[in-house]
Amino acid sequence: KAATTAVSKGKKATASKATRKPRATANGAAAKKRSVRTMEHKIAENEPMSKPFYVERGNEWNATDIDFDDLAVLRRMWELPAACHILWLLQNPLKLRFSNTLLEFEAALLNPATSTLLEDVFTKLLLKKSERECLTAGIGLKYEWWNKQLREYYVSMYDKWYALLRKAGEKVPDAFLGSDDDDDDDTSSTENGRATPEIDQELTDDEWMTLDILKARLEALGEECPLRHKSFTDLSAELRCKVLLNLCEAVMDDPANTEYVRLMEEDDLRVEPFGRDRVGNLYFFFPQFYEERRIYRLDVTDNSWALWAKGDESFRAMLKAMRDMRGRRLRGEQELINHLEVILEQMAEEAVEKAKQLEKLTRKAILEAIPRKRSMRLQVKQLEQIEQQREEQQKTEDLTPEELAERKRTELLKKVEREAEKEAKKLQQEQREREAAAQEREQRRQRRLEQEKQEQAQQQKLEEARKRQEEARKLRAQQRQAQDISSAEDENGNDSVEEDNPAADTQAPE
């Protein structure tokens, strides 16, 4: 009742304020009402931020065969940075050679059959932990192997999902029902596209939980298995990216990986917007990919995802547009401006550092180019090296993408072998150090045992001496006791003799 009274009073006060006449100024003119900013005003003010600041011109894709329409599709997908973020989190337990640019992942998804990056990623995602330990970071199996394993994995997952759906009496895709003609007695009849089992079977709690997990995991890829009749390269770029994210999420759900990620910093785990514009659109930045900084925008009206800024120029243009925007700034705009300023400062510092490194290399090259007195043999050797480098460069330019990928794979294998040899030498050195330490411990133990033996022998000698002294004391006591007894017997004998001859002691009379 009190709340109702307060509301009614508030309404009356509002009505009285509305009917109150405007206050007159000194000139008699009515005071102007404060204008209300509608969404149309905010959209008009947000016009400088309405278009992306980065436009793809293809400068980074020279001498590559890609479809720019597929590239545009990938850059409109939030699934790509999400999958790459999971791979960044799990790079140590999965033994991945992680790339610090999203551009490499885009190139890999556009040409999956020749990508060494996808060889490493999908191999480590599909192998078990014990099998994964046999491979080093950056080394994976070829496309033919992981494509087959990926297909078998998803076909088995979909078959299990369909079987639980059929058992629960849910709708099953016609493609699955048509491929299961051998089990006519056990299968259910379909009626209006819905499976109706002949014998109603209740699912257990574990089966219901498994069904919910499979449904949540596989619905994003469609009701039918996308890899049942297609290879990974036959899929669209969008579906390839979704398969990658789906597999990354499945591996992330492994208890060991979940426990590993739980110990990481919260700032590394969460992906949150770092600002917003006048109309509320959210902007995301992924600091993990620092070698190629990007800003993505999430449109709040249709939840569309787009690449908004990439590189130094687009970042500066975006910051200028935010600063020049007219009107009162809303919450989140200043945060976006502050983050952009910090990022640009970091980029400027990195540019200065790169300029210093380039200057050092330039001076070094100039010094090396200065003519020096050298023998003819050294000059000939240097010319041979230059000619060899030119030939290798020419061969590299003449290679096809497949040959170039194979060459990179071979070089990577050699590098891994060198690292393995280095690691083996390190392990041998550690083994020698461990053996030396073990030998030293054994020597200390032997010395300690010898010392204990000596102490035991000395203790035994002392014990024997003590026993001998004790026996000597007992012997002396027995001797004294025997002497006392003999002396006592002698005294008793003398007394008896005197009693038997009393006259012997008297003198004869004269």
Image (cartoon, rainbow, N blue to C red):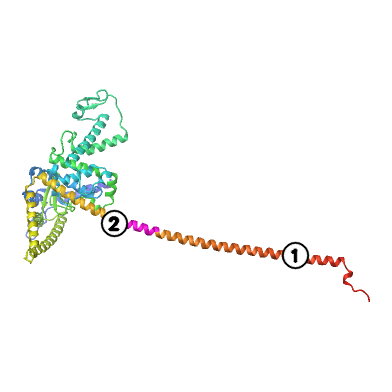
Toward the viewer: 411 or 97?
Answer: 411
Residue most toward the bottom? Answer: 510
Location of residue 430 in the rendering, given as x and y in whole percent from the top left corner: 30, 56
Location of residue 76 in the rendering, given as x and y in whole percent from the top left corner: 12, 45
Highlighted range, magenta: 432-442
Residue most toward the top? Answer: 185
State how many labels appear. 2
Is 80 placed left or right of 252 in the picture? left
Is 38 placed left or right of 123 in the picture? left
**Residue appearing at x 18%, y 44% in the figure:** 119
Q: Is residue 441 magenta?
A: yes
How crowded pointer 1 is (Cα within 10 Å; few <14, some 14-19, many 20+) is rated as: few
Residue to which mark 2 is pinned? 429
Residue to which mark 1 is pinned? 486
How crowded pointer 2 is (Cα within 10 Å; few <14, some 14-19, many 20+) is rated as: few
Q: Earlier in the sequence, mark 2 or mark 1?
A: 2
Q: Is residue 322 above or below residue 298?
A: below
Predominant secondary structure in magenta?
Answer: helix
Which of the two marks, 2 or 1, is nearer to us in this view?
A: 1
Element carrying mark 2:
helix
